[in-house]
Image: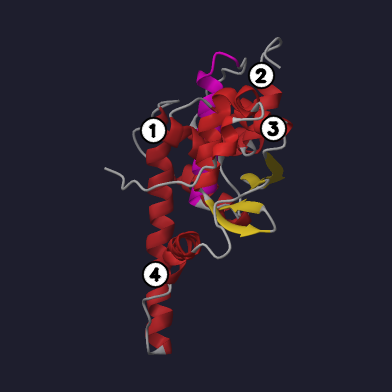
Amino acid sequence: MTKSYSIRIWSGLLSNGHTQKIENALWEFIWLVNKVTKEEDGIGYVLRGTPVKINDICNDLKRSYWGVYKHLQQLKKYKYINIKKAPYGIIVTINNSKKFIKNDKAGLAQQDKTEKDSLAPQVNSLAPQVNSLAQKDKANKIIKDIKDNNIYIEVFDYWNKKEIIVHKKLSAKAKTLIKSKVNEGYNKENIKDTIHNYWIILNGEEYYFKYRWTLEEFLQRGFEKFKDADIAHENYLREGKK
């Protein structure tokens, strides 16, 4: 079970017509407040201003992409949040953020802990040290080979998990195409997110695009079409849903 903790929400949200403006977007708003890790001049920076993936919000709240997208736009419309598009996500800031309060020891302590937690994976990744340069070069090569192979396997398994078209084995051509995407600057999470965007469009009743590619075809013909979830959403939404 995920460890739970308190979230600072101010009672002002219960007045001044906020309930009518926020409505069902309340859960997305709470999710964003929970992810604020930096606050300056009343502006709260979700994940310190790094890109947020809408799919992560969908997964945590168990809501559809279209539902979360509409609620975020609702929060933006009434100026609760600001949204800026970024590669593989959106940058979100919260207006009138009061998660961390000056001279509030508990709030400042929580901010410090939240920032440390967000940096922990980066710190831990730097922990292993190799004294000898020769050993380090050798270790790096081994690690790179392992990582390359892991990327192939992880992308392949993720594709089959989505059951778009299930493959019995990973072809040499698919490996080459995956490696090509990595060489272009995409990491495994970028590739998986793009597959997920494609899967959402295929299975969403509100979308008209229903063509199922193989993994190889998707990497060759579909990747660029679905790498940006917002653009794919707008491009393939049925008439009457926009």
Image quadrant in which you'd find residue 62: top left
Q: Residue at x 54, y 45 (%)?
A: 33
Mark 1 near mark 2, Cβ–Cβ under 8 Å? no
Label 1 vs label 2, nearer the camera: 2
Residue matched to label 4: 124
Give yes or no for contact between labels 3 and 1 (Cβ–Cβ under 8 Å).
no
- Mark carried by residue 231: 3
Label 1: which secondary element: helix
- Badge 1, how many Cα within 10 Å: few under 14, some, many 20+? some
Q: Residue furthest top?
A: 240
Tag 1 residue: 160
82 vs 190, nearest the viewer: 82
- Residue 149 in magenta? no
- Sequence order check: which comes first, mark 3 or mark 2? 3
Q: Quadrant of the C terminus?
A: top right
Height in image: 105 above or below 37?
below
Q: Amino acid at mark 4?
A: Asn
Asked which secondary structure carries label 4, the reply is helix
Up-down relation of residue 49 to residue 194 (above or below): below
Q: Which element type, helix, strand or loop, lies under badge 3? A: helix
Q: Earlier in the sequence, mark 1 or mark 4?
A: 4
User: Which residue is located at x 49 percent, y 47 percent?
Assistant: 8
Q: Residue 63 at what x, y percent from top left?
A: 48, 26
Q: Which residue is mark 2?
A: 237
Please name the predominant secondary structure of the magenta segment in the image.
Answer: helix
Residues at marks 1 and 4 touching, judged by CB atoms closer than 8 Å = no
Q: CA distance from mark 1 to mark 2?
A: 25 Å
Task: Magenta stretch: give its range.
Answer: 188-206
